[in-house]
């Protein structure tokens, strides 16, 4: 969810929940999923057709909004399961000390998914079906990589055991190639591209790689190039942002940059590849051809 009164917050594609939705749909093909960025659209949709579950991204920048929308959903129908997920909680801080103050503020949130959301949300959905779609019962369950919030009459937070993140990232269907992000690609939103996850380094202050054992994991080249083609054929954005912690760390990143560069030369948008945390040695090898903006 983003505030919609200023443009700065609405400009990126909801890539994160795209992954979560694509992986959930793979495991629950009969379930209907809709993705929203604007709070009013979600609330209106909830009023017109009751969902079983509403799952919201929670980041530092939308915490109050997420709390407001979660409470609004419970006000409309307390039997809807309310879930939050996002980088606020990782394996390093998913403990009573950190979760207690969070859930004290987010009393209407039934469960919080820790770290990468794909595997745990599927575990949560399986349990949701098993307990007969009862939010009060979900709050009593211990589910891997999920924290459940104070069951009625019982003041405790249940923190599920940690699962490692997926080894084969291609197990997650592409949110672009499965077309669940089409409505956002067709708007002016800036697309993201993820070619790898995690990081091989182990800086003590950083939690980015802890749940993957500092193992860098990659999406297949075929998939990444296919996503660049698909994004290029639809987006109206001039930019493509990669979410990789270190794009350029792998030799094959030059192939990705070359492919992107070819798309630019064919005058297909986007025209700028925005990178974070790039390693200098590799930057030099492809930046001039890809016209990278770091
Ligand atoms: C790209 C990026 C940006 C971009 C785009 C941001 C945007 N609006 O989307 C820019 C440069 C604009 C940016 C700015 C900022 N960013 Co930034 N950014 C990132 C970065 C590098 C990648 C995020 C990403 O899309 N990753 C790919 C997706 C797939 O991963 P994900 O977001 O983690 O989502 C997964 C899980 O979190 C989880 N999940 C997420 N949502 C949900 C929802 C549900 C229901 C479930 C079940 C699971 C789930 O499942 C997803 C799939 O595995 C991350 C660092 C990182 N490498 O993760 C920081 C990060 C997200 N940013 C961060 C911060 C602090 C900021 C700023 C506030 C910095 C500042 N002081 O200005 C601003 C705020 C921007 C804003 N208001 O929108 C923090 C957030 C910390 C937090 N607890 O929320 C991060 C984690 C970096 C860090 N470690 O400090 N950022
Ligand atoms: S992502 Fe950056 S800060 Fe975190 S462990 Fe890797 S190199 Fe260190």
Image (cartoon, rainbow, N blue to C red):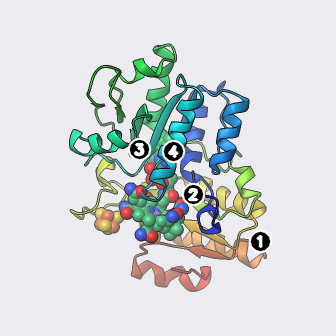
Q: What element carries label 4?
A: helix
Q: Earlier in the sequence, mark 1 or mark 4?
A: 4
Q: How far apart are marks 2 and 3 (CA)?
A: 16 Å
Q: In which quarter of the image is residue 240?
A: bottom right
Q: Earlier in the sequence, mark 4 or mark 2?
A: 4
Q: Is mark 1 on a helix, strand or loop?
A: loop
Q: Which residue is drawn at 55% across and 31% down?
A: 75
Q: Which of marks 2 and 1 is in front?
A: 1
Q: Nearer the viewer, mark 4 or mark 2?
A: 4
Residue 171 visible? The answer is no
Residue closer to the observer: 132 or 228: 132
Q: In which quarter of the image is residue 5?
A: bottom right
Would you name the residue on which mark 4 appears?
68
Would you name the residue on which mark 3 appears?
167
Q: Is 159 displayed left or right of 62 in the figure?
A: left
Residue closer to the observer: 284 or 52: 52
What label does residue 268 carry, if any? Answer: 1
Q: Which residue is drawn at 57% across and 57% down?
A: 221
**Is disc 2 surrounded by few (<14), some (14 to 19) or many (20+) residues within 10 Å?**
some
Q: Distance between the residues labelled 4 and 3?
A: 35 Å
Would you name the residue on which mark 2 appears?
221
Above or below for 138 versus 112: above
């Amino acid at each position: 969810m983003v505030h919609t009164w200023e443009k700065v917050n609405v400009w990126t594609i909801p890539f994160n929940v795209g992954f979560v939705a694509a992986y959930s749909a793979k495991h629950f093909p009969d379930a209907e999923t809709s993705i929203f960025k604007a709070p009013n659209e979600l609330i209106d949709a909830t009023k017109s057709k009751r969902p079983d579950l509403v799952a919201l991204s929670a980041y530092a920048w939308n915490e109050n909004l997420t709390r407001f929308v979660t409470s609004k959903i419970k006000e409309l129908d307390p039997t809807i399961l309310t879930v939050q997920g996002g980088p606020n909680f990782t394996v390093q801080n998913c403990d009573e000390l950190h979760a207690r103050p969070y859930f004290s503020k987010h009393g209407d949130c039934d469960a919080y998914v820790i770290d990468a959301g794909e595997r745990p949300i599927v575990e949560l959905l399986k349990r949701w079906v098993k307990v007969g779609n009862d939010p009060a019962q979900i709050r009593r369950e211990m589910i891997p990589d999920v924290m459940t919030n104070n069951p009625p009459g019982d003041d405790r937070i249940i923190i599920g055991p940690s699962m490692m993140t997926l080894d084969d990232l291609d197990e997650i269907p592409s949110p672009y190639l499965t077309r669940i992000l089409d409505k956002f690609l067709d708007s002016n939103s800036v697309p993201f591209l993820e070619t790898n996850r995690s990081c091989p380094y182990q800086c003590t202050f950083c939690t980015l790689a802890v749940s993957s054992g500092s193992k860098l994991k990659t999406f297949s080249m075929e998939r990444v190039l296919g996503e660049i083609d698909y994004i290029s054929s639809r987006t109206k954005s001039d930019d493509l942002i990669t979410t990789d912690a270190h794009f350029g760390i792998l030799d094959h990143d030059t192939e990705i940059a070359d492919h992107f560069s070819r798309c630019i030369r064919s005058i297909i948008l986007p025209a700028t590849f925005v990178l974070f945390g790039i390693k200098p040695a590799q930057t030099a090898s492809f930046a001039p051809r890809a016209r990278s903006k770091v």
